[in-house]
Image: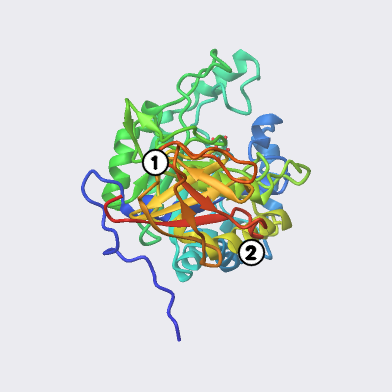
Amino acid sequence: MTTTPTPTDTDAEAVAGEIAPWFTHDRFGMFIHWGLYALPARHEWVMNYEKIQQEEYEKYAKYFDPDLYDPRAWARAAKAAGMKYVVLTTKHHEGFCLWDTALTDYKAPNTPAGRDLVREFVDAVRAEGLRVGFYHSLLDWHHPDFTIDGRHPRRDDSPEEIERLNAGRDMATYREYLHGQIRELLTDYGRIDYLFYDFSYEYEPHNPVWGGKGAKDWGAEELLALTRELQPGIVVNDRLGIPGDIVTPEQYQPSEPMKVDGVEVPWEACQTINGSWGYFRDNHNHKAPELMIRMLVDGVSKNGNMLLNVGPTARGELDSVATEALEAFAEWMHLHSRSIYGAGASAFETPVDARYTQRGNRLYLHLFSWPFEHIHLPGLAGKVEYAQLLGDASELSFREIDPDTPALTTGMGGQPAGTLTLQLPVVRPDVAIPVVELFLKDEA
Ligand code: GLC
């Protein structure tokens, strides 16, 4: 019987001050946005967008009955897709908690779900040998002490009403609640590999009157210290309003490796399938699976991770669009994952319409468009000992064409010095992105 290896404390131990190596090795994770917002199914910010009063919004807790919830199926789909870690929303801005917290009644055990959904998630993800991450909202539109600000669903109430409401609210009490819940999550569920806090908005251009919130409001320094004390080696993102271990660009593709003060930093782009994080029934703005695979490759070619989001329905299932996207990743990663895991940017000049990922002396050429028979690779002349299509390990030949070679009717002319010309089959391999694996000479 094969046992599923569980990430142990010894593999890839974090060096003090260094990010846990598993993160920059594994490159690909699943983000899961799930909560009461799956019921209105109109975006996870529906309470804000539609300025739904809390009393009205609470009705969804009465109908939250995810009878088809099977986190093991989610974890299996993630694993098959080649994802190595899974990050679940424990609480989103709406304030509803998926675990059995002692600090509020606004939680899954008090709904028809009737149980701790985070417990089952953690057990399922671990059982599939994947790493566990928690997303936790710093905002809380349900908590009675969270003051109304520029992003609050009640931001457009009358100024007098907001003044009156805020007079009775104490952010210090909210901070205690926030830190208390983090203590629960990082104490009662075993090893947690990644904490994705969300988000700080100190500078609130949308509503300068009521303004935003940031590090001070969250007690960020203490919260980060608590997080590290309870889970040494955990990876923490950059949204507490103070620096974290990684930066988290959202819904765009960085054009180069990310830097902070000129220093390159580990990063992870979090991406949606259709622009919404929560399940959005009538939003059909779906990215093509091939585009999302290209986004993964593009990110790795710039030393970045991809955290691809799914928004399960209120029944607890992944919808068909998410399932199809994960299956497309499964098909491609089955053949090409070694061009992703442990790989990163290469110093070699990338040809047009392609990306390089490199892992030691293996250089992976990802072809976003299929050229006719040849591709010229600047700077690789004399540096390659063997080449193959990664998908089927079929050999590819290559040569250097002397720069002085005249172009003839039926013969290609010379290429700039240092260029290696690779011979490709006419027929494009039937995979989302064809990849050439180049074995570099040690001295390359
Ligand atoms: C943004 C969205 C929030 C989502 C987060 C994920 O902050 O507003 O809803 O959870 O991104 O990165």
Q: Is residue 68 left or right of residue 125?
A: right
Q: Earlier in the sequence, mark 1 or mark 2?
A: 2
Provide the residue designation for mark 1.
418
Position in image of residue 345 (x %, y %): 40, 43
Residue 19 vs residue 154: left or right?
Answer: left
The image quadrant of residue 76 is bottom right
**Residue at image mark 2:** 69
Distance from label 1 to label 2 (Cα)?
57 Å
Front position in the image: 330 or 396: 396
Q: Amino acid at mark 1?
A: Gly
Residue sitting farthest toward the right: 282
Q: Where 356 sits versus 255, above or below?
A: below
Question: Of all residues shown, which one is farthest toward the left?
Answer: 16
The vertical placement of 42 against 84, above or below, is above
> How many residues crowd around disc 2 within 10 Å: few (fewer than 14), some, or many (20 or more)?
many
Question: Identity of the amino acid at label 2?
Answer: Tyr
Mark 1: few, some, or many residues within 10 Å (few <14, many ≥20)? Answer: some
The reply to whether residue 104 is visible in this rendering is no
The answer to whether mark 1 and mark 2 are in CB contact below 8 A is: no
**In the picture shown, does residue 30 fall above or below 376?**
below
Q: Give the residue displayed 35% in from the left and 34% down from the top.
A: 220
Look at the numbered disc 2 and give the secondary structure of its residue.
Answer: loop
Q: State ligand 1's quadrant.
A: top right
Q: Position of residue 312 (x, y in %)?
A: 65, 54
